[in-house]
Amino acid sequence: MSKHIQLVDEIEERTQTLNLGPTHPATHGIFQNILEIDGEIVKSAEQTVGYIHRAFEKLAERRPFYQITPITDRLNYCSSPINNMGWHMTVEKLAGITLPKRVEYLRVIIMELSRIADHLVCNSVIGVDTGALTGFTYMFQEREFIYEIFEEICGSRLTTNIGRIGGLERDFSDACWQKIEKFMTDFQKKFNEFDSLLTRNRIFMDRCKGAGPISAERALNYGFTGPNLRAAGVDYDVRVTSPYSSYQDFEFDVPVGTTGDTYDRFLVRQEEIRQSLRIIRQAIDKLPKEGGFHADVPHYYLPQKEEVYNNMEALIYHFKIVMGESEIPAGEVYHSVEGGNGELGFYLVSDGGRSPYRLHFRRPCFIYYQAYPEMIKDGLLSDAILTMSSMNVIAGELDA
C-alpha cells in the first residue's frame, strides 16, 4: 500500500465527537446527545438524561393524593391538563368513583384543547428548525388563546393544576364558553394558513422527507405510542382501544402514516389537530345540561368555601382531605390516557395510607427517545435536529 493511499484511509476513518446539548436551542430542553460524526454524517449517538431529575415518583410517596396533581403538570408541560386528568382518573378508578357524563365531556374539551396546543408547538418548531419562523409566530397567538381559556377555567395557563379528583373545581363560566366558541370559529382559518405555509412547501418537504425514519416493527419493539407510532403505520390510539372519559361517544378518525419519517410525523399531528376540533365540536353540541361539574363524593372532593365556613360536616371533610386523612382503598391500578406524545400511564399501588405506596409514571417521551440513535444513524447532522423536533422530545418526561 502506498503512503498516499494509507493517508487517505486514515482521513476517511477520522471522526469527531460533538455535544448536542445539554444547553442548546435545538434540543428544546435540558438533555444531551453525544454524537460521533464523520463530516456531516452521524455515525453514532448516545443520550444523557437526568439534567432535570425532580424525583416525581418519590415525591408522590410523601404527598396526599390530591397534592400530586401539580407534580403531573411538570411532565409534558405543553399539554399539562391531559396529565392532570390522567392522574385524577387513576385515583377515581382505584376509589370506584363514577363521574357525571357532563364532567367527562368537559374534561374531553379541555384535553383536546391541550392536544391542539401541544401539536402546534411541535409542528411549528419543525418549521423553525427547517428555517421557517413565520408559522411559529402565527401559531403562537393561537396557543396563547388556548391558555386564556385554561385561565378562565382554573386561573392558570401553562402548568394548570386543573380539575380535582371527582371532577372540576368550578363550572365553565360564560366568559369561558364565549372564548371556546371564538376559538372554534377563528382557529380553523388561521390553521389552514399555517398548513398552506408548510405542508406542500417544496423546501419543507425536501428537508423532512426521509429524515429520521423508523419502521412499524422497530417502533413497536421500542414501545412507541402516540403520533410517532401512528406515523410509522400502526393504528393505535388509547382513546379508541381503551376509551375513557366517554371518548366512545365521539366520532373521529385516527390518522396513520406509512414511512415513519419526519414528514409523516408532521402530517399525522396536523390531522390530529383537525380531529381534535371535530371532537370538541361534538362535545359542545352533546353536552348534557344536568349533572353538575363534579361527582357527589365528599370523601374525596373538596367542598365549596361557603359550605366550609357555614357547615360543620363540610369543614370536617375539608380538613380530612387537606390533611390526607380520607380513606383511599388499598389495591393497585393502571390507567392510561392518550397524551400529546402517546400513552401516558399511571401505575398506582395503594396500601390504604394517606399517600401512594408506589406511583410510576409511564412517560411516552422517555420510551421513544431510546430509539433516537438508531433513527439518526448514517443521516445528516441537520436531519438529527429535525428528527428530534418531530419526535417532540419533552425534557420534563425524560427523568421522573
Image (cartoon, rainbow, N blue to C red):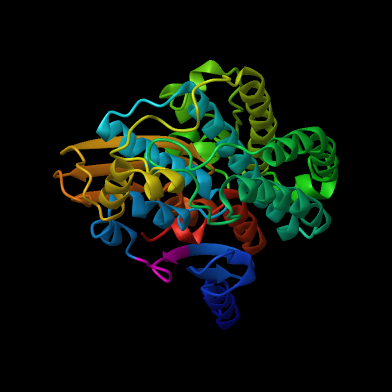
Residue 56 inside the magenta-drawn segment: no
Q: Nearer the viewer, residue 157 or 45?
A: 157
Instruction: Give the residue drawn at x 21%, y 41%.
Output: 328
Q: Nearer the viewer, residue 121 or 302?
A: 302
* 247 vs 202: above or below: above
Report the side of 285 relative to 299 (left or right). right
Q: Where the C terminus falls, by quadrant?
A: bottom left
State which quadrant residue 304 falls in.
Answer: top left
Instruction: Give the residue drawn at x 70%, y 31%.
Output: 274
Report the side of 351 relative to 245 (left or right). left
Estimate the x, y position of residue 25 in percent, counting from the top left. 63, 70
Estimate the x, y position of residue 76 in percent, counting from the top left. 50, 53
State which quadrant residue 220 falls in.
Answer: top left
Is residue 223 visible to the viewer in this orientation of the structure?
no
Estimate the x, y position of residue 82 in percent, counting from the top left. 50, 42
Is residue 35 visible to the viewer in this orientation of the structure?
yes
* 195 vs 80: above or below: above
Query: How many badges with numbers are in the image?
Result: 0
Instruction: Give the residue drawn at x 77%, y 44%.
Output: 205
Can you name the residue that lies furthest to the bottom here?
Answer: 3
Residue 48 inside the magenta-drawn segment: yes
* 271 vs 395: above or below: above
Q: Nearer the viewer, residue 220 or 25?
A: 25
Could you tell me what secondary structure mostly forms the magenta stretch?
A: loop
State which quadrant residue 259 falls in.
Answer: top right
The magenta span reads 45-54
Estimate the x, y position of residue 337 in percent, counting from the top left. 44, 36
